[in-house]
Image: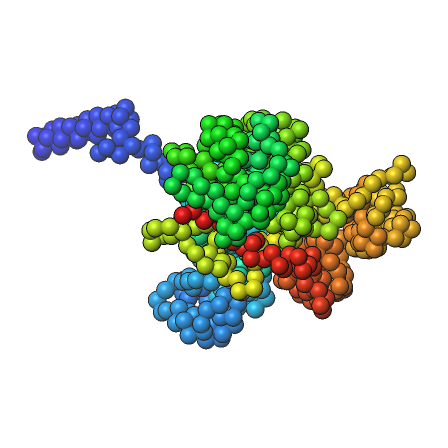
Amino acid sequence: MNVRAVVVLIVFLLIFSVMVTRVGYIQMKKAVKGHELEAIAEDRWTRKQTIEGKRGTIYDRFGDALAEEIPSYTIEAILDVNSRNRVEDPRMTAEKLAPIVDRSVVELERLLSHEGRFQVELGPGTKNISLEKKREIEQLNLQGINFRKEPRRYYPKQTFASHVIGYTERDMSKARMGLESSLNNYLVKEDGFIQYLSDRKGIKLPNIDEIIELPKNGFDIYLTLDSNIQMALEQVMSQVEEQYDPERIMAVVADPKTGEILAMSNRPSFNPNFYEEITNYTNFTVSSRFEPGSTMKIFTLAAAIEEGVYVGDEYYQSGSYQIGGRRVRDHNQGMGWGQIPFDEGFQRSSNVAYSILALEKLGPDRLFHYINEFGFRNTTGIDLPNEVNSLVADSYLIDAATTAFGQGTAITPIQQIQAVTAIANGGKMMKPFVIDRIIDPNTGEIIESTEPEIVGEPISSTTATQVLELMESVVDSPAGTGKPYYIEGFEIAGKTGTAEIPNPNGGGYLSGHGQYIYSFLGVAPKSDPQLIVYVAVDRPELDLHEPGAAPVSQIFTTIMKHSLQYLNISPGAIVSQDDLVVEEGVLTKSYVGESIESAKAHFREIGVEAIVLGSGDKVEEQLPIGRTMLIPGEKVMIATDSNTYKMPNIKGWSLRDVMKLATILELNANFIGSGFVTKQSIPSNHTVEKGDYIAIELALPNGVTENVFYNEEVEAEKIEETEEGVQID
């Protein structure tokens, strides 16, 4: 017995020694079989919750959101038989859900009838739904239908500068194109977290410090785009696309004084909220080069004037011009117009005139010097992705002639915009840009900003003025090819272009009615240019009697007139000393902060109709703002210090007045047609909230057409306007 006791004691001591040694080893190493004990304990007792950051917002120049992160919701159906809140009637639930989520009743019923599942998602149409649709479904009181909240990227203005802004995946996991992609490093967010110790039920332990890592929100981007001008451009381009079904349309509106891009659009375009439907990923205005046609004559003319070799009243023989073994012909089948002065050659867009200027007056070396000076050999450096460079033909003598009048050499629309700023800005050429500033939303600090940049002075201000005079004569002279671009009361200066398109099957150019790129590059007002508008329409489907200028002028005249009026650049307005009476117009005063009655009395006195929005007593906002010239009978919008607003009856209103209403109430307006309002989707006297959507139909009065400025002389010259392309034997 004593021996056994000793043996047991020895064994016990050995086991105890091993255990003590093991415990000491574990305490020292803090690991078991390679597993870190502290990490295991921390994981078991530590709770970590994500604090979501927010992707940066892209705004227009006035702070209207163009791309933003918003909450969205995914529908989940509870099917667990042990749950009190489960779908008990799949058929009834499917029938009520189907019309809202645009799914078939049969498919939804099948998904809602899965036995053995705890919960299911219901597929397309039930993911990333808006708050409005969520509320609509909640009002149905469907048992077992829940919602999972998750962030998504949303583009509130739909098809709006889509190729400029680009898009991300809905969950923002990938930025795909446009500024969303090129500025992703600025826009991207970093999630934060909160970490604390808890008991086994997850309840935070008392008197324990938390670890908090705040999220980093993405920076906000402010663009130079003006939503008012951009929206008007989108609308008229959609109308032209529907009417003429062209291969593509490109349009840019810019400020010649600064280089700011106020609007930019392409067709085909897309709605970035439905990026699966995209058919065109190319921003043609910066990523497509083509032979510009006769808009290039602007810069050849400027070079000749600057070099002192241009004599406008000097005569030359139009029709055709021999260059070695090749012959350049004017666009009227080489017949020309006899002996005419060079000024008339510019107005008629004579290829012969500009071949003579290039080869006999300037010479190829000086011509290509100005091609360089106007920036046609380099990209502009605009802050948009995927800008392509030009292809300048300069190997042979014929290349100088064809480049001078816009064939053979391929350039981009944005290069033309940059070059024409020198014409419109007293000789100073401005770099185009679309990003105004980048801001840290947490601190308000400006991270980066863009200042107007002069990138060259290819010509003098005297030359620029002379070129503008001749460009105006293209529009308002009897011989000018630009008469379809005339706008009553405004000084429009510009140049038409009709560019031939290389045959994709090889050999020569496409031929036939409508098989050209028709364009117009214009500035206004000529005496002090405030806007540049470039429009190009590629191969529209024209009726036999229609000129190529028809779709281009519809876009140009609509957007130029709208923009000039919106910017309060009115025809013939001269301000008098009392700051109230002007020729052909009246100046408003600002009544913000004053009583509604005093504002109404003032506007009634000067013959302007005041539209009062809301039931408050004070003027909270006024549009147009004070010191703005208005035409008598025009409308001024006055928003009061009210919480709710009633929709006025806008039937018969002009597009300009409706745009003011949409701006002051922050309505998302969709315009159909042109002219004056005939229908409104929100009836008059209905309550509206900021951000509401409204569809507005417009039409011209009976007997009135868009191009009321056509006359018999223009009709007689339509053939000349549509066949401006070069003919080379």
On screen, residue 684 above or below 421:
below
Colour scheme of the rendered structure:
rainbow
Q: Residue at x 71, y 36 (%)?
A: 528
The total of numbered circles placed on residues is 0
**Residue 569 relative to residue 336: left or right:** right
Q: Looking at the picture, how far across and down is residue 58, in whole percent?
A: 56, 42
Q: Looking at the picture, how far across and down is residue 136, in whole percent?
A: 58, 64
**Among the 4 quarters of the image, the one containing residue 80:** bottom left
Quadrant holding the N terminus: top left
On screen, residue 284 above or below 540:
above
Q: Looking at the picture, how far across and down is residue 641, in whole percent?
A: 79, 49
Q: Residue at x 63, y 48 (%)?
A: 480
Q: Looking at the picture, how far across and down is residue 385, in whole percent?
A: 46, 39
On screen, residue 514 above or below 91:
above
Q: Nearer the viewer, residue 668 or 553?
A: 553
Residue 75 appearing in the image: no
Q: Nearer the viewer, residue 164 or 618?
A: 164
**Residue 287 relative to residue 595: left or right:** left
**Among the 4 quarters of the image, the one containing residue 698:** bottom right
Q: Nearer the viewer, residue 160 or 318?
A: 318
Residue 239 appearing in the image: yes
Q: Residue at x 52, y 47 (%)?
A: 319
**Among the 4 quarters of the image, the one containing residue 20:** top left
Q: Residue at x 90, y 38 (%)?
A: 578
